[in-house]
Image: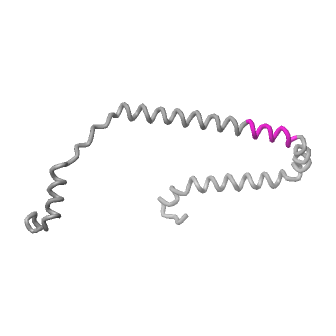
Amino acid sequence: MTADSLPDPLKALLLADEETSVILPQRDLAFTVEVMARIERQQLRENLVLIGVLFVAVSAILAIVMPYVTPLIVDAGQALIPAVLVLSALGAMAIAVQWMRPGLRMMGLPV
C-alpha cells in the first residue's frame, strides 16, 4: 500500500506524524545512578529499622515465654533425642540429594 492509495485523512495523519517526530532527550546516567543509590539507601534504612523492631519484639516475647517453656523442653529433651537424631539425618540426606540432583541428571538418572 503506497501513500498515494491511502484515504486523504489517513494520509494527512501519517504525514503529520512523520513531520513532528519527537526527539527523546538523552539520559543522564550519573543522575540515574545517584537517584537509584538514594532509593537503595532509604530502603536499607527502612529494612534495618524493621529488623531491629522485630528483633526487640521477638526478644521480649522469648524473655516472657522461655521461663515457662524451658522446664518442658528439658523434661521432653531426654525422650526426644532419638527422634531429633533421625530427623537430623533425614534432613542432611534431603539436602545432599537436592545438591546432587543436577549432577545425577547430567549422568542420565531421572531424579
Residue 81 location (% of width, % of height): 83, 50
Q: Residue at x 65, y 38 (%)?
A: 50
Q: Residue at x 60, y 38 (%)?
A: 47
Residue 54 against residue 7 in the figure, above or below: above
Could you tell me which quadrant the C terminus lies in? bottom right
Q: Quadrant of residue 9?
A: bottom left
In the picture provided, is 97 more to the left or to the right than 79?
left
Could you tell me which quadrant the N terminus lies in? bottom left
Q: Residue at x 7, y 65 (%)?
A: 4
Residue 27 location (% of width, % of height): 31, 37
Residue 64 located within the stretch drawn in magenta: yes
In the picture provided, is 55 more to the left or to the right than 48?
right
Q: Magenta part of the protein: which range?
A: 56-66
In the rendered picture of this protein, how many numbered marks are placed on residues? 0
54 or 110: nearer the viewer: 54
In the picture provided, is 55 more to the left or to the right than 23?
right
Residue 102 against residue 32 in the figure, above or below: below
Q: Main secondary structure of the magenta part?
A: helix
Point out the residue furthest to the front here: 9
In the picture provided, is 53 more to the left or to the right than 6?
right
Point out the residue furthest to the left here: 4
Residue 46 located within the stretch drawn in magenta: no
74 or 41: nearer the viewer: 41
Residue 23 location (% of width, % of height): 22, 43
Residue 39 location (% of width, % of height): 49, 36
Residue 17 against residue 26 in the figure, above or below: below
Name the colouring of the figure: one colour
Q: Residue at x 55, y 57 (%)?
A: 101
